[in-house]
Image (cartoon, rainbow, N blue to C red):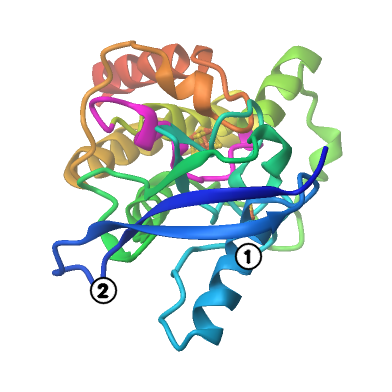
């Protein structure tokens, strides 16, 4: 496959208060082997050489781990491929002559900071409200390996823990619900013995914080699961609902 010439329609917004607008750009000679972010690097180099302001976008690891690269591409969080983040998306998913729409993740709880960068600190505050366990570090600590864990539970806890907090679930949901994210964070502890001590407070506090941050309600559309780059299952939402009910009855 040869190189591609593309038209990009990109959301430009100077700051949180600016109204923002879509702006057209052209990039030429894009290799199908480039990642989506490398393609944006080409655009930014072009803009800088012309004395224009580069497009601000978030990224860190560029290998699907940090969850920073939150882009809405042609109407899909992380673009048209499945099971990948924007940094893992390859330009071979596009064709010569394509027009690509690039926008920030949109949700009330994720305000735009600049261009394609949104503030996802709401997720951090949810995590701080309960996404931890207390461990005895007095010197009499039980070796974690000495606590038996059912294999199926261990696998499910691990799967839940692969959530990278990217926010694609929120951006894909018509209600901007954060249920998939929060349920993954609740589940990774709910499934393990180490998570039992704070189980009641954890789910109540995390759900309370989620609501306070302005995320919408879950109406079971399942769009989050489809767009999640880590394949986090809706099963986690069902588990969180059970945990929440148990905790409410106790509380
Ligand atoms: S559940 Fe999936 S889409 Fe949502 S934050 Fe975690 S990894 Fe991203
Ligand atoms: S830049 Fe880290 S997941 Fe994409």
Q: In the rendering, at what x and y percent does residue 17 appear?
A: 14, 69
Q: Which residue is mark 2?
A: 14
Number of numbered discs overlaid on the protein picture: 2
Crowdedness near tag 2: few (<14), some (14–19) or many (≥20) residues, C-alpha within 10 Å: some
Please say whether residue 111 is one of the residues in the magenta stretch. Answer: no
Q: Which residues are magenta?
A: 161-176
| Residue visible at 44% across and 69% down in the picture | 55
Q: Secondary structure at mark 1?
A: loop
Q: Is mark 1 within 8 Å of ligand 2?
A: yes
- Judge from the rendering whether residue 79 lies leftward or rightward of residue 110; answer left or right: right
Task: Write the residue at 79% across / 41% down.
Answer: 144
Quickly name the residue at label 1: 60
User: Could you tell me residue 94's position as x and y percent?
Assistant: 63, 36
Percent x, y of residue 54: 46, 76
Disc 2 versus disc 1: distance between alpha carbons? 21 Å
Give neighbour class at mark 1: few <14, some 14-19, many 20+ (Cα, 10 Å): few
Instruction: Give the SS element for disc 2.
Output: loop
Q: Residue at x 20, y 46 (%)?
A: 108
Image quarter in which the C terminus is found: top left
């Amino acid at each position: 496959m040869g190189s591609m010439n593309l038209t990009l329609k990109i959301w430009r917004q100077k700051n949180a208060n600016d109204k923002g607008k879509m702006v057209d750009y052209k990039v030429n000679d894009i290799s199908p082997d480039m990642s989506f972010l490398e393609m944006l690097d080409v655009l930014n180099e072009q803009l800088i050489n012309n004395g224009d302001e580069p497009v601000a976008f978030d990224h860190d690891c560029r290998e699907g781990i940090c969850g920073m690269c939150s882009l809405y591409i042609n109407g899909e969080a992380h673009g048209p491929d499945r099971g990948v983040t924007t940094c893992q998306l390859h330009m071979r998913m596009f064709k010569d002559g394509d027009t690509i729409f690039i926008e920030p993740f949109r949700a009330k709880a994720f305000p735009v900071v600049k261009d394609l960068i949104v503030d996802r600190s709401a997720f951090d505050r949810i995590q701080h409200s309960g996404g931890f366990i207390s461990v005895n570090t007095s010197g009499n600590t039980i070796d974690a390996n000495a606590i038996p864990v059912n294999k199926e539970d261990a696998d499910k806890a691990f799967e839940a823990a692969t959530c990278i907090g990217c926010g694609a679930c929120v951006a894909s949901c018509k209600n901007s619900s954060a249920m998939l994210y929060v349920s993954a964070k609740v589940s990774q502890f709910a499934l393990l013995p180490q998570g039992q001590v704070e189980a009641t407070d954890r789910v109540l506090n995390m759900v309370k914080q989620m609501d306070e941050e302005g995320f919408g309600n879950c109406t079971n559309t399942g769009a989050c699961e489809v767009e999640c780059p880590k394949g986090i299952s809706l099963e986690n939402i069902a588990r969180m609902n059970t945990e929440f009910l148990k905790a409410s009855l106790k509380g």
